[in-house]
Image (tube, grey):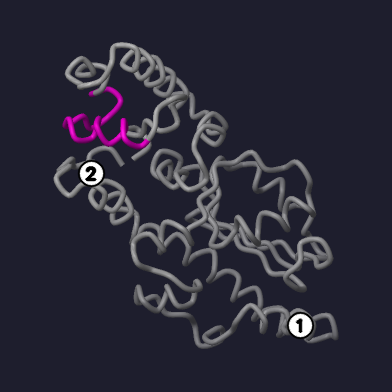
Amino acid sequence: MLNNTYIHIPCIGSLTERTIWKSGIKSWDDFLINHGTLKTTKKKQRVLYSGVEESIEQLSGKNHIFFARRLLPCHQWRAYRQFEDKTAFVDIETTGLSSQSDSITIIGVYNGKETKTYIKGINLDEATQELAKYKQLVTFNGARFDLPFIEHEFPGFFNHLHIDLMYPLKNIGYSGGLKKIECLLGIRRSEETEGISGFEAVRLWNKYKKGNDEALEVLIKYNKEDVENLKTIIDMTYQKMVDNEIAPKDKKCGVNLSQTI
């Protein structure tokens, strides 16, 4: 959906963006050809035209930082498809809830093909080298939890696009925690991890620190399922997010973005 997004252009808001969609324009390239048909001022057309040209150039160069800076956090999910090949699904385990007084125990990173696990006291410091390979991160409640912890542990590493799935999922009717949403979507956990909560994950880490290696194995598996299920969830719901973004505010919009996402 990124290549039919306009609200990242300075001085352009959601009403103008919706006007463009209603006109039948389906992409930035389409806009460059048909912008003259828009019912808006010549000045705004010039702003849009310049902004679209710049956006095409930046996307062609895969400049994620441009879009990370221009798009509000609540709109960054729109970039998912365009940066999908440089996306990491991320989840952390911790000793508690405070990024200031507690610490990360595990960082799981899934790139759609392989999951890598970084563990405190073993290889946690290598996690940022892995994350630096990607341009887009997908989390669940990461804006309030995962990223503050990572930023506190590794200051200054973050320049990624960030999709916190909790918010676009809520907009399409899936509210609650990650495990609840997995159930709503028919995603099943393994027998070893079914029923484990964030609180239980802390207890598993404490058991490991007391010498129980099996507890660490379960915790790693739990974290692995977390990150891999994030991709399953966004792939199952992304089109609904697009449809919801276009339709609810104007049922007559009728623009099909399926060719652009």
> Residue visible at 40% across and 43% down?
78
Query: Could you tell me residue 128's position as x and y percent?
Result: 72, 48
Residue shown at the point (51%, 41%) measured from the top left: 72
**Callout 1, which amino acid?**
Asp
- Label 1 residue SS: helix
Q: Main SS of the magenta segment? A: helix
Q: Quadrant of residue 55?
A: top left
Q: Residue 259, image x and y in percent?
A: 23, 39
Q: Secondary structure under badge 2?
A: loop
Residue that appears at 53% across and 71% down: 225
Q: Residues within 10 Å of mark 2 (few under 14, many from 20)?
A: few
In the rendered structure, which amino acid carries the disc numbered 2?
Answer: Ser
Q: Is residue 199 left or right of residue 34?
A: right
The span shown in magenta is 14-30
Q: Position of residue 154 (x, y in %)?
A: 78, 49
The front one of 242 and 226 is 242
**Residue 119's image quarter?**
bottom right
Report crowding for label 1: few under 14, some 14 to 19, many 20 or more residues within 10 A (C-alpha).
some
Using the numbered discs, state the Cα–Cα distance from disc 1 to disc 2 in whole angstroms: 48 Å
Q: Is residue 35 left or right of residue 164?
A: left
Q: In what quadrant of the picture does the N terminus appear?
A: top left
Residue 258 shows which numbered tag? 2
In the rendered image, the quadrant that contains the C terminus is top left
Q: Which residue is mark 1?
A: 213
Is 123 in front, or is 185? 185
> Closer to the camera: disc 1 or disc 2?
2
Mark 1 or mark 2: which comes first in sequence? 1
| Relative height, residue 225 to residue 40 (above, below) | below
